[in-house]
């Protein structure tokens, strides 16, 4: 089938590559000409396991094209995906400007009946706005064409985006058009083989499903962080509590790890956006507001532990920091807890020596050259001359460090662990001062 995807970010590029991999002919359009040129040369602008080979192979096979010419894209696809960013505006609402710009572009060049699919995460009602924008552009051109706007939210996870797209848990299709439904079923048939994954619903419910999913996951994290903080006060061990509650199948083990708060491009913005949507219809979203407050506070928890150990003047102290990305297996530092910590350490006068397996370029881009910041080529070199180690992201590579080396390198023998990666008893035996999250009973 002929497909066009607007936006070659995490969602658009991965989805386009997955569709090309099963045989569809996909044209990707982006306004970022630089990105398009790099993709044509086989340079992948983001890190996602398995993505590079998928893009390069399908591009070479002619099934995956890249262009900055929107007209070429609109004229290609019978299905036009919108997968552009929807960042928060100053009130926390999702800014749908890019989505509506693409809608207008489609309306400006559309030359036959087609289906427009919104894959961006957008507030309930945006499909109507997309339809209105295309209608407006068509009427300016005095053209009368039939098109349908479908909501098809994306559920991929950064870090396993390719696997998630190739083997989705569910494919939500919001439409009231039988024709669009059939077309979408045909498009996704290669991904819907082992069991029925396609769920058809009305457009508004599909739009809300995406927010509800992310907000539920954010709620689990904030709830568990609340229990962790309480455990510290009560002298209980949240890791034991986690195992204890996760064994109940109604709760499950997923997404109940305590830590330093959620980050990334989705949870923070989607929780804020749903709060904003609720306010617009005069509804008070009390649970969502609490989720957001807990998360904002949780991002300062490591810094508070550092201050309670050292006092609030950190002048002359150097911290080795392991993990910059907001979670493992990505280079994404949007709303990352590491940023809140690094900036707090700087304000208190400390120096930071950081290492991350993938997010070094991004950190360089964000912070540039500074006297109080050094990006180190390995996790070991980040330790040299440091007083303490802070673990912010639970990359596999940090799980079993050489503790003897840590003892030799860290002047103060202190570890602040924001992800409960290490065993407190072992670290105590090695005479480390070890701080983790919610393990009151064992420290
Ligand atoms: P992104 O910022 O990585 O990429 C967006 C791309 O859209 C950029 O390359 C940008 O240049 C391009 N763009 C902007 N305006 C354009 C236009 N008029 N025409 C063509 N291209 C244009 O964004 P993302 O992370 O891929 O997210 C896209 C959407 O999907 C968002 O709504 C997001 O909430 C949602 N989403 C993201 C994830 C995720 O994990 N990143 C998961 C599910 C859903």
Image (cartoon, helix red, strand yellow):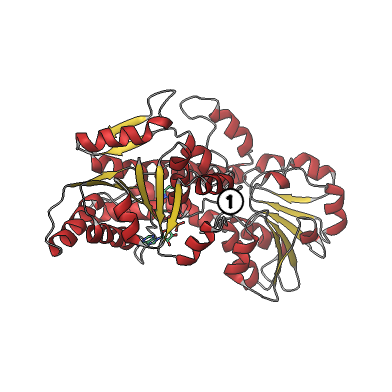
Judge the density around disc 1: few (<14), some (14-19), many (≥20) Cα neighbours within 10 Å. Answer: many
Tell me if residue 245 comes above or below residue 321 in the rendering: above
Decide if residue 84 is on the left or right side of residue 337. left
Residue at coordinates 25% horizontally, 52% vertically from top-left? Answer: 126
Can you give x and y, in whole percent of width and height, for residue 222 in the image? 49, 46
Q: Quadrant of residue 422?
A: top right
Residue at coordinates 48% horizontally, 39% vertically from top-left? Answer: 21
Foreground of the two, 41 or 269: 41
**Visible in this render: residue 201?**
no
Q: Quadrant of residue 111?
A: bottom left
Can you give x and y, in whole percent of width and height, for residue 297 in the image? 51, 56
Ligand 1 location (quadrant): bottom left
Label tally:
1
Residue at coordinates 24% horizontally, 50% vertically from top-left? Answer: 127
Foreground of the two, 228 or 283: 283
Return the residue at label 1: 330
Can you give x and y, in whole percent of width and height, for residue 317 in the image? 75, 69
Foreground of the two, 111 or 306: 111
Tell me if residue 394 comes above or below residue 313 in the rendering: above
Decide if residue 441 is on the left or right side of residue 299. right
**Visible in this render: residue 377?**
yes
Decide if residue 370 is on the left or right side of residue 17. right
Label 1 within 8 A of ligand 1 by Cβ = no
Q: Quadrant of the N terminus?
A: top left
Q: Quadrant of the C terminus?
A: top right
Decide if residue 104 is on the left or right side of residue 82. left
For label 1, the SS is loop
Can you give x and y, in whole percent of width and height, for residue 152 in the image? 33, 42
């Amino acid at each position: 089938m002929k497909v066009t995807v607007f936006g070659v970010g995490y969602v658009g590029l991965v989805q386009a590559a997955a569709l090309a991999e099963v045989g569809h002919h996909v044209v990707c359009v982006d306004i970022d000409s630089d990105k398009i040129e790099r993709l044509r040369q086989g340079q992948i602008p983001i890190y996602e396991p398995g993505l590079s080979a998928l893009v390069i192979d399908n591009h070479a096979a002619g099934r995956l094209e890249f262009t900055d010419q929107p007209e070429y894209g609109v004229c290609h696809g019978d299905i036009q995906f919108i997968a552009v960013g929807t960042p928060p505006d100053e009130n926390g609402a999702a800014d749908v400007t890019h989505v509506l710009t693409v809608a207008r572009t489609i309306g400006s060049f559309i030359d036959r009946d087609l289906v427009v699919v919104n894959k961006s995460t957008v507030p309930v009602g945006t499909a109507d706005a997309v339809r209105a924008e295309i209608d407006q552009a068509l009427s300016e051109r005095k053209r009368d064409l039939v098109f349908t706007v479908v909501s098809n939210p994306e559920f991929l996870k950064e870090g396993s985006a390719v696997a998630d797209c190739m083997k989705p848990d569910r494919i939500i299709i919001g439409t009231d058009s039988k024709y669009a439904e059939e077309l979408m079923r045909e498009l996704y048939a290669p991904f819907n083989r082992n069991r029925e994954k396609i769920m058809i619903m009305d457009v508004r419910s599909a739009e809300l499903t995406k927010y509800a999913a992310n907000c539920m996951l954010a709620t689990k994290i904030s709830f568990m962080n609340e229990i962790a903080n309480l455990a510290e006060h009560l002298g209980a061990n949240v890791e034991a509590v986690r195992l204890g509650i996760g064994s109940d199948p109604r709760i499950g083990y997923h997404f109940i790890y305590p830590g330093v708060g959620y980050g990334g491009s989705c949870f923070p913005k989607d929780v804020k956006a749903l709060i904003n949507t609720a306010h617009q219809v005069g509804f008070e979203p009390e649970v969502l507001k609490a989720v957001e407050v807990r998360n904002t506070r949780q991002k300062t928890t490591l810094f508070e532990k550092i201050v309670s150990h050292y006092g609030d003047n950190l002048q002359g102290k150097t911290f080795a920091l392991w993990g910059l990305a907001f979670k493992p297996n990505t280079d994404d530092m949007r709303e990352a807890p590491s940023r809140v910590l690094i900036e707090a350490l700087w304000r208190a006068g400390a120096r930071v020596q950081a290492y991350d397996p993938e997010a070094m370029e991004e950190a360089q881009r964000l912070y540039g050259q500074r006297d109080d910041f050094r990006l180190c080529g390995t996790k070991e070199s980040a330790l040299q001359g440091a007083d303490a180690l802070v673990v912010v992201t639970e990359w596999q590579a940090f799980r079993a460090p050489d503790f003897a080396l840590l003892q030799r390198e860290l002047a103060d023998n202190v570890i602040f662990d924001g992800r409960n990666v290490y065993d407190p008893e072992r670290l105590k035996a090695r005479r480390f001062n070890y701080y983790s999250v919610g393990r009151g009973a064992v420290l």
